[in-house]
Structure formats: structure tokens, C-alpha cells
Image (tube, coloured by chain):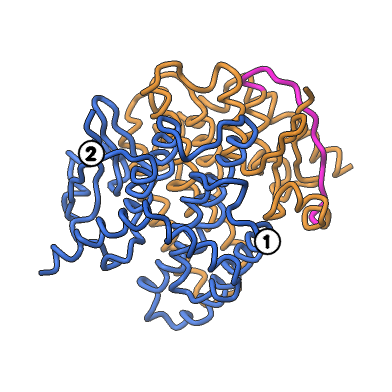
Chain colours: A orange, B blue
């Protein structure tokens, strides 16, 4: 059954692989599933046809036969559940890998995402500098906890899992804030993720979309 | 096997059921699993014994035999996967219910949580009113999308699921902002959640902890 995902026609990150379709592409590459991509303009994302798929008018979505999903975390989980390679077989290890998926999206990502948003939306506000400092403290706090837990392990809990996949994509978004360099083990962890062949294939595929849209 | 969760010794919400242990208590009540609660002071949450369980030093955690989990979303999912009642049997419906779990935590909760935090941390800032308006717009935007999708349905996708459980707890946090009243179908949806016997038992249990700590 053909898998179709949606992505930005022209990603605001200019092809740096920070948009959320990257997570889904990477997961599909890890498990060796081919997929089609339907590109959307910002206008099309807010139109009824797309809102029927994604109530919040965002990307990515995932369609496979009569199944339609949204939310990158849920899509990555669906892929991980259907195909071997992204979740351990052992029940307890599997539950812990899922814990890292939620931790990436619900605990680590929010302040990182807020900072990205603030640099766009609040740049001219009187509170901008102070707000950045607050967000940076909050990000640093999260990264510090994560760094202590990771220690010198290769991945967060045993073998590479969907939890690592999401965490690496979340940490990549913090690179713009320049804080990852303060935590060398996290920087190395992100580099290990980026070195995976599946990551590279996914990254190249999303970059090709941006390059094509820019010529 | 005994299930033990952690919760605030004295919840900052003063027993209104907004702390994240409420989600786990509610899920356990829905599936009829008894549990023990270990109460933690703010100090104990940052000590090595608790950090070994929860790398970010928060509540709740979940222990069952040799399994230890953190992140309320992951814990609710674990409970929903192990016991009938919180996820549909049909594979596609199950994937959609999981999508709503991620949507509650990764799309709807962040601006609501930010607003709560701003009312504590930024109350004395000169920009406070303007910042609240920005956050309110962002929350209103999410609630509007959710309200349109829910329409006059009882729950988000067929029968009550772990997705509804998380979404109701997230929406309850927005009540303080007073915005839920602008979306009568969401207010009714939250009321339906709060009317469930399992919700009531969970709510009473967390309130009893606060009441006992205050006398």
C-alpha cells in the first residue's frame, strides 16, 4: 500500500531538515519503506482539503490506504510499531523507548520550539532580550538533564530507537541557539544520528525539495 | 505486581487536579488498576534517588516490578496498551487515538503550559499584558481548530480513548485563561470527561493528598 506524506513546498528552514516531515522521512528510511510526498503551500495548508487530514493545518500528515494520521510523533510511532528496527522487542525496553519519544516531544522540544518562534515573532518586542534569556535558561536546564542521563552511552537506552530518532531531530533545532556545544556528549549524539545512512537519505530528499523550489 | 506512581507532596495547583499525576491516576482508574503513591517534596524531586527514575526531576513516574517509566504521556500509553478500555481494538482507530495523545501533548498543551508559567514568572514585567495577549491568541488558535474538528461529537474519534483522557486534562489547564467558554463544545467535552466515575475517583484521590498536607 502506498504511503504518502505531506511536506512544505518551500520549507522555511531553507532545507536544513528542521521541518517535522524530516522525522517521518527518517523513520521510513530506517525501516526501508518507500513513500510519496505531496508538497503544500502555506495557503493550501489552511484549506479544507488539508484541514480534513490535519485539524491544526500543519505538516506532516501520513496516508496509507484508508488510514490518515497527523502529528509527527504519532506517525513515527505508527511506523515503528508496524516495521522492525525502531522499537526493541523486549516489552520493558520498548516502553522505555516510547518514554523517550514522549520526553523528546513534550519535555525537551517545547522551549526549543518557543525560542525559534520568539526569534521570528517577538524580535521587535520590548521583552525580546529578556525573553531569550529565559528561554535559553529553560533549554539549558533540559539539555543539562539529558546530558547527565546520556553520559557516555551511544543512545538513550540500549540500541538506537524511535526515541533517539525524535530526540536527535529535536536537539538539531537547538543548534541555532548555539547551546549544544556546551554539552559535548549531546553534540556527539546528534552527530551519530546524522551519520546514519537512513538519516542522510532523508536529509537529501528534503533538501532536494527546497533546492528544486529555489531554482 | 504493585504499581507505584509519584506525585507532589503538596501540589502547586492546590488540589485542582492540574498536576500531571492526575492523568496517570485517571488512566489507572479507567482500567481498574490499583496503585500506590509516593509523595515527593520539591527538594526530593531534584535529588539523585528521584533523578535516577526521572532524568528531568519531575513527577509523575511509574514503577511496576523492574519497569520504571516517566513522562505522563508515555505512562498513560503504557497503561492503555496493557489493559483494555483506553485504546480501540481496530488497528486504524487505535493509530488515530494515539495521534490524539500526541496532539494533546505536543500541539495543544505547549501554549497553555506557557501561559500558566508566564502568569507566575512574568507577572511583574512591564510587558506582561502584551505577552498574555500573544499567548491567548496562540491558545485560541489551537482551541478553535480543535473545536471545529470535534463539532458535536462526544469524543474526538469514536469511543472515549487515551487521546480524550490526555486532551481533557490539557484543556482543563486552559480554564484559568477563561478561554474554554468561547468554545461551548469544548467546555461540554471537558465536562463529559470530568463526569466519568474514573475521573472523579482520580480527582478525589489527588485532592485528598493536598487536603491532608494542608491540615
In this view, which residue lies farthest toward the right?
A215
In the image, what residue occupies the spot 13% across and 63% down?
B212
Q: Secondary structure at mark 1?
A: loop
Horizontally, residue A27 falls left or right of residue A150, namely right
Q: Are marks 1 and 2 in contact (CB under 8 Å)?
A: no
For image coordinates 30% across by 46% down, the residue present is B60
Instruction: Point out residue B72 in the picture as x, y percentages from the top left corner.
Output: 38, 45
- From which residue to which does the magenta span run? A29-42
Circles 1 and 2 on the same chain: yes
* Res. B94 in view: yes
Of A190 and A9, the residue lying toward us: A9
The residue where tag 2 is placed is B4
Find out whether residue A31 is within the magenta segment.
Answer: yes
Which label's residue is closer to the chain start, 1 or 2? 2
Q: Is residue B164 left or right of residue A69?
A: left
Residue appearing at x 52%, y 28% in the figure: A162
Direction from residue A118 to residue A88 in the image, left or right: left
Q: Is residue B207 above or below residue B131?
A: above
Find residue B205 and report its image quarter. bottom left
Pick the quarter of the image with the N terminus of chain B: top left
Q: Quadrant of residue A68?
A: top right
Q: Is residue A53 above or below residue A132?
A: above
Closest to the camera, between mark 1 and mark 2, is 1
**Mark 1 sits on what residue?**
B151
Amino acid at each position: 500500500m502506498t504511503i504518502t506524506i505531506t511536506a512544505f513546498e518551500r520549507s522555511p528552514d531553507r532545507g536544513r531538515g528542521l521541518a517535522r516531515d524530516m522525522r517521518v522521512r527518517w523513520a521510513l528510511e530506517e525501516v526501508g519503506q518507500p513513500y510519496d510526498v505531496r508538497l503544500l503551500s502555506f495557503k493550501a495548508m489552511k484549506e479544507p482539503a488539508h484541514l480534513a487530514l490535519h485539524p491544526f493545518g500543519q505538516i506532516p500528515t501520513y496516508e496509507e490506504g484508508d488510514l490518515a494520521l497527523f502529528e509527527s510523533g504519532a506517525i513515527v510511532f505508527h511506523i515503528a510499531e508496524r516495521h522492525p528496527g525502531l522499537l526493541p522487542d523486549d516489552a520493558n525496553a520498548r516502553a522505555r523507548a516510547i518514554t523517550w519519544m514522549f520526553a523528546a516531544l513534550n519535555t525537551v522540544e517545547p522551549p526549543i520550539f518557543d525560542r525559534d518562534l520568539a526569534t521570528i515573532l517577538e524580535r521587535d518586542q520590548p521583552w525580546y532580550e529578556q525573553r531569550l534569556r529565559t528561554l535559553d535558561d529553560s533549554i539549558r536546564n533540559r539539555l543539562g538533564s539529558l546530558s547527565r542521563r546520556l553520559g557516555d552511552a551511544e543512545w538513550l537506552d540500549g540500541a538506537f530507537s524511535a526515541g533517539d530518532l525524535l530526540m536527535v531531530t529535536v536537539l538539531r533545532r537547538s543548534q541555532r541557539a548555539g547551546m549544544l556545544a556546551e554539552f559535548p556528549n549531546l553534540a556527539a549524539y546528534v552527530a551519530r544520528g546524522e551519520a546514519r545512512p537512513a538519516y542522510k537519505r532523508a536529509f537529501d530528499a528534503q533538501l532536494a525539495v527546497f533546492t528544486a523550489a529555489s531554482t
